[in-house]
Image (cartoon, helix red, strand yellow):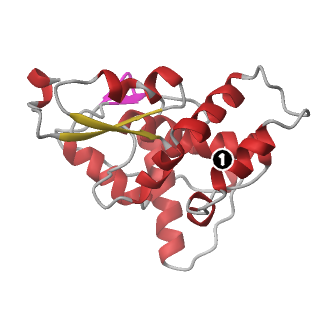
Amino acid sequence: MKQSYSVNLDTHIYLSGDLATYIQNAPERITCCSSTYVPDKFHVKKSFKSLFGICLTQYDIFSPTFSSDYLSHLNNHNINQKDLDVINLKYLLRYKPDSLKNWYNHDYLGCSQECMNSHYFASRLDKKPNTFTNKSLDKLCTIINAKHNNLSLNINLNEKYYNQSSITLSPDWLFEENHRYIEFNNHLLRNTLRNLSGL
């Protein structure tokens, strides 16, 4: 970390990741700088949706009884106590309940770009991780354009019902390998995608 990110003892970083307990406890093992664990929204919200059928909100997270209420729900006999999601979520609520509040810190930029790309873009546009393509980007731009111009869209899986628009992405910081994968290692492209997504 010192070599790759030039951190020192005065540096503070956010360590984002899923709910695995080794990631939750990783800040305790980092000695070259101070760090704070923040669970990424995708994994937490997915767990709450699948376990409780709710979309977790900021109001929930800042409720004074948030942790105790949901720990109580997780101890319900109808919930599989051996399920890894349940185990990790119980650990989070018991030992790191304030970590979710970090989502709303002005200096927290979100989970890693890889997670944003694979979970936000790919899973919503293609249902396949790591397959965000020019065609997917074209669809996303069409949806955002329609939203901002108050236009309605007719969406159908059969392509004969609409004309597929085409866009050309030619900057040298973007390329597709075998017409499938886009390289996401450039800061400018990350900002472009973040702005498009509204995140």
Q: Position of residue 23 (x, y in %)?
A: 44, 25
Magenta range: 176-182
Residue pictured at 41% horizontal, 60% vertical: 104
Give the quarter of the image for residue 111. top left
Q: In terms of depth relative to the viewer, which is nearer, 41 or 72?
A: 72
Q: Residues within 10 Å of mark 1 (few under 14, many from 20)?
A: few
Q: Position of residue 81 (x, y in %)?
A: 79, 25
The residue pinned by badge 1 equals 159
Q: In terms of depth relative to the viewer, which is nearer, 37 or 109?
A: 37
Query: Which quadrant, please, contains the C terminus?
Result: bottom left
At mark 1, the secondary structure is helix
Residue type beneath disc 1:
Glu
Q: Is residue 180 covered in magenta? A: yes
Q: Is residue 5 covered in magenta? A: no
Check the image and report above or below for 180 versus 37: above
- The answer to whether one can see residue 165 in this image is no
